[in-house]
Image: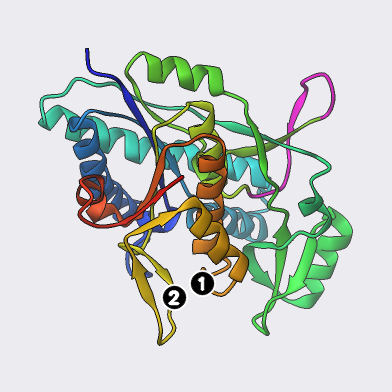
Amino acid sequence: MTERKIAVVAIGGNSLIKDKQHQTVKDQYDAAKETAQHIAEMIEAGWDVVIGHGNGPQVGFILRRSEIAHKVEGMHELPLDVCGADSQGAIGYALQQNLQNELYLRGMTKPVSTVITQVLVDKDDPAFKSPSKPIGSFMDQAEAQSRAEDMGWDVVEDAGRGWRRVVASPLPVEVVEFSSIKALVDAGTVVIAVGGGGIPVIDTGDRQFQGTAAVIDKDFASSLLAQLLNADLLLISTAVEKVALNFGKSNQEWIDHMTLAEVKQYLEEGSHFAKGSMEPKMKAIVWFLESGGKQAIVTDPENIGRALKGETGTLIEP
C-alpha cells in the first residue's frame, strides 16, 4: 500500500475570472473547468487533494446585486457572512461538477464534495479595531455617512473614487467543520472547503457561533487547514508561474527555490512581495512550514503538473 500524500491547494477567486470581459457565471464555470483539469492531474499522480479558494470578486457581485435589488425593489440586503456562504456554494458547485466530470473522463471514481465551512476568528482580534478591507460598491459621502450612522458600517474615502465600506481581516483560529472535512479526506473524497477563507464566525460564549462582518484571507485559512490535516504540501495557485524578488522593478528576479529562513528574511526586508497579493501568501506559507509542514509551492494553475515534477514554480522548504 503506497503512503497517502495530502495536498491543500489554494486557488485565487481571481483565477475564476480571467479579465473584465469574462465575468459571467458561464465564464467562471469555464475557468473552473480548466483548473479542474490541472487538479485532476494531481489526483491521477496519487495526491489526496483538498481545495481552498478565494471569493473576492464573487462576493463583490453578490453584494452589488443585493444593493441594487434593495434600491430598486426594496428587497432586504444580504449580510456579508451570508454572501460568503452563497459564494462558497456557487464556486464549490462549479469546481465540484467540473472535477467530477474530469475524473470520470479519466476513468477515476473518486467522489468530490463541497463543505460549507465556518472559520472561527477571535472577537478580540486587533483587526476589528482597524478595519481595512474594502468591500461592496462605491458610494457618495452622504450615503456612506448614513450607512455608518444607521448600520454601524466603517467607511473610508477610497483614493478619490468615492466612499466604500471597509471590514476587518482577522486571523483564522479554528476550522469549525474540520472533523467532517477530515472524515471525508480519510474516506478518499476530494474536498472543497474554507471557500473565501471560510465564513467568519465568532464564539459568543459556550460554543455559540455567530457570523461576523469580516473577510479572512483564503491563503491563511488554507494554511491552517493544511496544518490541521498534517498535509505534505501547501500549493498556492496564483497569477504568476514563480515568485519574484523586487516584483515589478527593474531588478526583478524569479526564484526557483527558497528556504523558510530566506522567506522570513525577504518578508522582513519588506520590499520584495506586494502587500495585497504575494505578501499574505508568503506569510501563510511561513505559518504552515513553522507548524511542521514539509513543503510549499507557488505557481499558476496551468503549471501545477510541471511544478510538482520540479520543472517550474517556486518550491519553499523548511
Quadrant of the rendering where the N terminus is positioned: top left
What residue is shown with label 1? Answer: 272
Which residue is outermost to the right? 149
Segment tinted magenta in the rendering: 204-215
What residue is shown with label 2? Answer: 247
Judged left or right of residue 240, residue 66 is right
Q: Where residue 239 appears, x then y in whole percent?
A: 36, 62
* Depth check, front residue: 147 or 99: 99
- Residue at left 64%, top 50%? 215
The type of colouring in the image is rainbow
- Residue at left 39%, top 20%? 185
Q: Where residue 291 appears, x then y in whole percent?
A: 56, 36
The disc placed on residue 112 is none
- Residue at left 77%, top 66%? 155
Ranked by sequence position, the earlier of labels 2 and 1 is 2
Q: Where residue 304 appears, x then y in whole percent?
A: 26, 49
Crowd around label 1: few <14 · some 14–19 · many ≥20 (10 Å): many
Judged left or right of residue 41, residue 174 is right
User: Regarding mark 2 in the picture, which secondary structure is present there?
Assistant: loop
* Depth check, front residue: 100 or 37: 37
* Depth check, front residue: 200 or 252: 252
Q: Are marks 2 and 1 in contact (CB under 8 Å)?
A: yes
Looking at the rendered structure, the kind of residue marked 1 is His
- Residue at left 48%, top 53%? 58
Q: CA distance from mark 2 to mark 1?
A: 6 Å
Crowd around label 2: few <14 · some 14–19 · many ≥20 (10 Å): some
Quarter of the rendering containing residue 120: top right
Query: Magenta stretch containing residue 205, yes or no?
Result: yes
Looking at the rendered structure, the kind of residue marked 2 is Phe
